[in-house]
Image (tube, grey):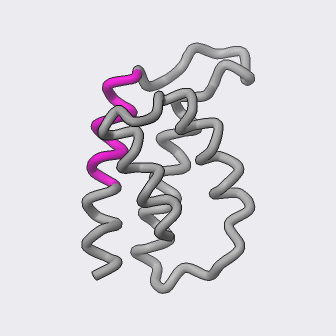
Amino acid sequence: MEALLVLAEAVSEGRITPDEFATVCLPLYKHYPYRYPSEEHYQAATELFYIADDYDSTGLGMPDLLNDDQVRQRAADVARRMRMLLR
């Protein structure tokens, strides 16, 4: 879960681009090797996945559903929730 939190914070703070975020987040979520401690942890991780998926929709032949600013804002919201869950 910490890797997803670091990723969410990095994109929300502008340390990585939304493209880089989506490139890392999608496979990380799909192949996450650990159990989530609770349903809330799983839901936060899943929401982060959907943010990346909604941004990286070009491979599906459709326009991106989220723009860069929306990705950053939504990732910041999920990061805050994840940080609280990890306390």
Along the viewing direction, whichever of 70 and 63 lies nearer the viewer: 70
Give the percent coordinates (x, y) of residue 24.
63, 44
In this rendering, the answer to whether 3 lies above or below 54 is below
Tell me which secondary structure the magenta stretch mostly adopts.
helix
Along the viewing direction, whichever of 83 and 16 lies nearer the viewer: 16
Q: Quadrant of residue 68?
A: top left
Quarter of the rendering occupied by the C terminus: bottom left
Give the percent coordinates (x, y) of residue 49.
55, 49
Picture residue at 65% right of the left edge, 78% below the top: 34
Residue 79 in magenta?
no
Picture residue at 72% right of the left edge, 15% below the top: 61
64 relative position to 43: left or right: right
Q: Quadrant of residue 72?
A: top left
Q: How many marks?
A: 0
Give the percent coordinates (x, y) of residue 57.
63, 25
Along the viewing direction, whichever of 45 and 20 lies nearer the viewer: 20
In this rendering, the answer to whether 63 lies above or below 42 is above
Residue sticking out furthest to the bottom: 37
Give the percent coordinates (x, y) of residue 47.
46, 53
In this rendering, the answer to whether 39 lies above or below 62 is below
Q: Which residues are magenta?
A: 68-78
Picture residue at 57% right of the left edge, 14% below the top: 63
Picture residue at 64% right of the left edge, 16% below the top: 62
In this rendering, the answer to whether 75 lies above or below 37 is above
48 relative position to 13: left or right: right
